[in-house]
Image (spheres, grey):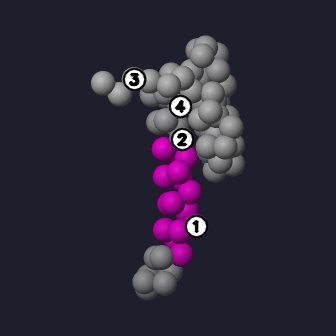
Amino acid sequence: MNIVNLTIFLVILILPMLFTFWAIRDVAYGQFPTLQTKYIWLVVVTLLPVVGALVYLVAGRSQRRATPTS
């Protein structure tokens, strides 16, 4: 496998999945108004891997509660 094929593999397969894993972690550790909202986002991000993560980034992060950083 040459460097070009490896780069294409990383960009097409690995990076989008890392984005999805980030979204799953963000939902799991985030505080939402209700537990049901959290579960719905987990299902969306898990069942629609890249698309669900993008939808969560655009619409879901605004539903999270602000947490104090002390």
Q: Main secondary structure of the magenta part?
A: helix
Residue 51 position in % (x across, y down): 69, 48
Which label number is shown at residue 68?
3
- Image coordinates of residue 65 in percent, x first then y, are 54, 23
**Answer yes or no: do the residues labelled 2 and 4 have beta carbons within 8 Å?**
yes
Give the spatial CA distance, label 1 vs label 4.
24 Å
Q: Which residue is mark 4?
A: 27
Quick one: quadrant of the C terminus? Answer: top left
Relative vertical location of residue 4 with respect to residue 37 in this rendering, above or below? below
Callout 4 amino acid: Val
Question: What is the secondary structure assignment of the residue under circle 4?
Answer: helix
* Of labels 1 and 4, the one closer to you: 4
Dot 1, crowdedness within 10 Å: few (<14), some or many (≥20)?
Answer: few
- Mark 1 or mark 2: name the one nearer the start of the chain: 1
Q: Label 1's element?
A: helix
| Marks 1 and 3, how far apart at CA | 37 Å
Q: Which residue is mark 1?
A: 12
State which region is magenta.
8-22
Q: Where, by quadrant of the figure, is residue 37 drawn?
A: top right
Q: Pointer 2: residues within 10 angstroms few (<14), some, or many (20+)?
A: many
Q: Would residue 19 be counted in the magenta stretch?
A: yes
Name the residue rendered at 48%, 76% in the picture.
Answer: 7
Q: Nearer the viewer, residue 33 or 11?
A: 33
